[in-house]
Amino acid sequence: MVLSRDIELDLETALIPDQSTPTQQNCSPTQRAWIEINETALRQNVKAIKQSLSPQTSLMAVVKADAYGHGAVNVAQTVLEAGGEALAVATLQEGIELRQAQIQAPILILGAIHTVEEIQALVKWNLEPTLCSLQQASVFGETLQTLQTSLPVHLKLDTGMSRLGVLWKDVVPFVRCVQKFPQLEIKSIYSHLATADEKNDTFMEVQRERFESAIAQLNSIGFTPPCFHLANSAATLRDPNCHYDLVRVGLALYGLSPSPHLASVSPLQPVLEVKARITQIKELPAGAGVSYGHQFITEKPTPIAVIGIGYADGVPRNLSNHLEVLLHGKKVPQIGAITMDQLMLDISNCEQVQPGDIVTLIGKQGEHTITANDWAQKLGTISWEILCSFKHRLPRIFTT
Ligand SMILES: *Cc1c(COP(=O)(O)O)cnc(C)c1O
């Protein structure tokens, strides 16, 4: 079988030593498989979210986990250009990656940081930590005293997520502890919601009332921090009462709704598409077993296509025989076990398929769209997990 031009090109470029970085741009679309990031969609999502906020509320883009698999540096730059005001990441290393790319916006580290070395790195890179306990706050204060420098900090309250933070009832002793150290500049007080994306949820309001009560306790001691924030994507879409001074938006930026009943609130567009090329086509006889374990046996003579993407790229093996992909604008079933680097399609309902043709695993072709949420539902998980499970072996290509 003659390989298409594109595949030949791919073989040539494959011989060049790989210098790719996780957020590599401009890689050739002759790859076997890749992720496309649509910058226009990302900008429009930022604008749509900004429009739903009052002018006093800023947008903090949550770009942890390499921007949910979209490439943190490029996403951060695009979001800031489109009107986002601040960034949040989970870890110190993620923050440093953004600073090394010359990103200047304020960056909040959502995760807990404890060691002296980490605190020195925060100072060096101008990153803003989360303080989540009195003990940790004291370590921060003492370390900064020794270093003779100060740092903006964000105080985390636990209002019912039962993850990081000081219980909302103890906000006053928490703030008093932090205030003992003039090196700690309290930039915001925040909390995180546990159930905002659940249908028929009533607990978000309980958390909001606890947050309000913390604000009232601070008022009663005459302390007014410059910023309060509570909302994730779901609460941002669901209830303006949760917006306060800033919203921390992740999933919605990437164009996915945190839950189906919030889908119509804002016109969000998925930003990421996952694509792969057909590497071989063949006609199988009836009774042929396909892939490891022969989980699929052809009932009749069947044309199949092999594509160059597998579970090592982030296509979950548990989707084997349940996955559908888009080819020539049609939905096509995947057959047999998904392997590490390749998977097979039954292309009986497509004509004139050629090696090198592009298959869309997540994204849009013709009138069909497949989203990360469709995969999540088949797997009993959530779209967040699907997005951040795509591996760096897939180059990220930015398109407009
Ligand atoms: C991840 C995260 C967010 C963003 O959540 P989305 O549901 O993706 O919008 C906001 N706040 C905190 C503390 C987080 O950990």
Image (tube, rainbow, N blue to C red):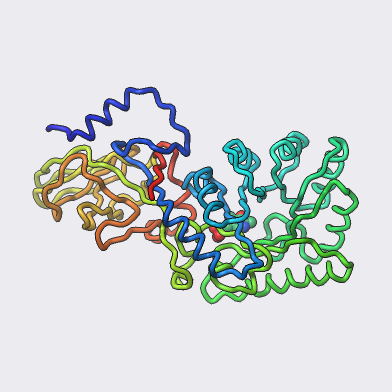
- Foreground of the two, 396 or 296: 396
Residue 317 at what x, y percent from top left?
36, 46
Which residue is depicted at the point 21% across and 57% down?
A: 330
User: Relative to 238, is 349 above or below?
Assistant: above
Whether residue 255 sits left or right of residue 214 in the image: it is: left
Residue 183: in sight, yes or no? yes
Which residue is depicted at the point 40% across and 39% down?
A: 395
Residue 196: in sight, yes or no? no
Which residue is depicted at the point 25% across and 30% down?
A: 9
Q: How many marks?
A: 0
- Foreground of the two, 351 or 309: 351
Residue 205 at what x, y percent from top left?
65, 75
Which residue is depicted at the point 50% across and 58% down?
A: 253
Ligand 1 quadrant in view:
bottom right
Residue 77 at what x, y percent from top left?
53, 47
User: Relative to 239, is 253 above or below?
Assistant: above
User: Relative to 64, is 241 above or below?
Assistant: below
